[in-house]
Structure formats: C-alpha cells, structure tokens
C-alpha cells in the first residue's frame, strides 16, 4: 500500500502546482489585455514622431543639435537591454539575452567598444553571474512603465552621445506582434538616419521653423522611442508568461491523468491481494 500512498501524495502535489499555474495564467491574461491596449495607444503617436524627426533632420542642423551628429566611425556604442524582473515566462528573457550577446559580439568583432546598460533583474543577474561589466542598472519598472521612467533611463545616453563619449545607442527589446509572437529586435536609436538618406524638409511647410521644432522633438523622440520599447516589452512578457503557464497547466493535467491511472491500478492490485488473502485464509480454516 506504500506505493499507492506515494502516488496519492504526488497527485496532491501536482494538483496544487496546477492550481498555481492556472492562477498565474489568468493573471497574465488580465495584464496582457491592459498591456496590449497600451501598445496600440503608443504606436500611432510614436510612429508619427519618428517619421517627422527622420524627415526633418538635416546636416545643416548638426552643429546646433549634437543629437543629429553623424560619427564617421563608431568607436564606442551603448547597448540598452530590456528584460523582465520576473521569470516563469518561457524563453522570453533567454531570447533577449541571447540577442544582446550576439550584438555585443558583433560590435566587438568590428572593433567597437561597448557599454552595457540593463533594465530588469533577469538580465542583470545573468551578466553579473558572468562578471560582465554593467554600466547602469534599472529594476522595478513594473507592468505600467511611464514616460518619465523612459526619459530618466534614456536621457544620460542621449547626453553621452551629444558629448561624443559614445557614437551609437542600441536598444534590445521584444517586438509585440501577438501574444504568441514576441521576437527580440534591435533598435538603432542613435544616430538618427534621415529617410531615404537625404534632407526631406522641403516636403513640409514648417511653422514655426524646423530648428524650433527639432529642439522640442529630438528629446521627445528619444523618450518616446524607449517608452514604446518598454510598453511592447511588458506586453511581450505577459504574452510569453500566459503561454508558458497555459502549457504548464495542460502538462499538469496530463501528469494527473497518468498518476490517477497508476494509483487506480495500484489500489486495484492491493484490493485483489487482500481478497486473495481472505479467500486463502478461509480455505485454510476449512
């Protein structure tokens, strides 16, 4: 009977685990809906800001706006990696870290020095464990990243680019296509490349002047680009977590079905043995 009792304990343990994963799946589903709404709200505005900046920026403004400078050679680049503070999201964090490692290796091979900046405990823990130097760390961004948070993170990198300390800024994050498709991507945030590689300001009638517009739009471009990346990263995280927890719940159900059959066979064998012992004992008394 000891075998049946062990199986019974395993069944209870798996049932408890399934209850936890089912609850986490429901929570992730709720958070995913809110995160998806924020992504949809952020995209049109973000696309418009990026489009205007890329079309209006001109070589004539480089001296007035250091953010528009075009380094002849990328001597040093900043890589900003966005990960989650929590796990249990399938390969979400691992895929982002892998993408960052590939980018760092490519930059190193091309002779470019790098500064690694990380948002999220999972990315920080990975590179700390490997003694990789981290230039800056940000945690506890939460499920509702704000524009202010994005500005606080990206502003120092913008200043370093303007001063010439770095020549490029890359952002490694997830692109939210759907709850099932959240591939990692690399955004070349700086330097800013004009559309079609030429000055497009003649396509617009600018009021006030392009100079005044760029003075406002350039910081907004940096802040909003990172905000959008943060928002999409949160949505991708929740989508990955919901998928992972649903798979775990389904697998727990399969394990429970197998354990239940095993328990029933063990119990049936025990009952059969007890009946045989009773029958044997009765026969011996005769």
Image (tube, rainbow, N blue to C red):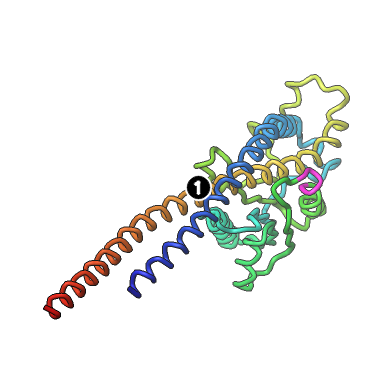
Prevailing secondary structure class for the magenta stretch in the rendered image:
helix
For label 1, the crowd category at 10 Å Cα-Cα, with few meaning under 14, some 14 to 19 and many 20 or more, is some
Q: Position of residue 48 (x, y in %)?
A: 71, 29
Q: Position of residue 226 (x, y in %)?
A: 71, 45
Report the side of 242 relative to 84 (left or right): left
Question: In percent of the image, x 84 and y 42: which residue is there?
Answer: 63
Q: Secondary structure at mark 1?
A: helix
Report the side of 11 relative to 175 (left or right): left
Magenta stretch bounds: 146-150
Residue named by callout 1: 243
In this rendered view, identify the residue nearer to me: 227 or 198: 227
Looking at the image, residue 191 lies above or below residue 120: above
Q: Residue furthest bottom?
A: 284
Report the side of 180 relative to 205 (left or right): left
Looking at the image, residue 217 lies above or below residue 226: above
Question: In percent of the image, x 65 and y 50: which residue is there?
Answer: 171
Report the side of 173 relative to 223 (left or right): left
């Amino acid at each position: 009977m000891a075998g049946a009792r062990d199986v019974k304990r395993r069944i209870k343990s798996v049932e408890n685990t399934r209850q936890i994963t089912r609850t986490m799946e429901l929570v992730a589903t709720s958070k995913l809906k809110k995160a998806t709404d924020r992504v949809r709200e952020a995209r049109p505005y973000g696309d418009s800001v990026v489009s205007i900046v890329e079309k209006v920026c001109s070589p004539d403004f480089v001296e007035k706006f250091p953010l528009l400078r075009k380094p002849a050679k990328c001597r040093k680049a900043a890589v900003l990696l966005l990960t989650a503070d929590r796990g249990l999201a399938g390969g979400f964090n691992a895929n982002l870290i892998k993408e960052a490692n590939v980018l760092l290796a490519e930059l190193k091979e091309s002779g470019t020095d790098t500064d690694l900046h990380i948002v999220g405990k999972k990315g920080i823990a990975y590179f700390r464990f490997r003694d990789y130097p981290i230039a800056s760390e940000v945690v506890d961004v939460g499920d509702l990243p704000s524009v202010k948070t994005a500005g606080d993170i990206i502003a120092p990198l913008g200043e370093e680019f303007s001063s010439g300390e770095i020549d490029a800024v890359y952002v490694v994050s997830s692109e939210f296509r759907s709850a099932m498709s959240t591939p990692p991507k690399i955004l070349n945030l700086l330097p800013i490349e004009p559309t079609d590689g030429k000055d497009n300001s003649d396509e617009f009638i600018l009021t006030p002047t392009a100079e005044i517009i760029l003075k406002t739009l350039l910081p907004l471009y940096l802040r909003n680009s990172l905000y959008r990346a943060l928002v999409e990263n949160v949505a991708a995280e929740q989508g990955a977590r919901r998928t992972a927890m649903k798979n775990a719940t389904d697998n727990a159900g399969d394990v429970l079905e197998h354990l239940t059959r095993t328990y029933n066979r063990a119990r049936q064998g025990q009952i059969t043995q007890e009946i045989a012992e009773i029958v044997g004992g009765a026969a011996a008394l005769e």
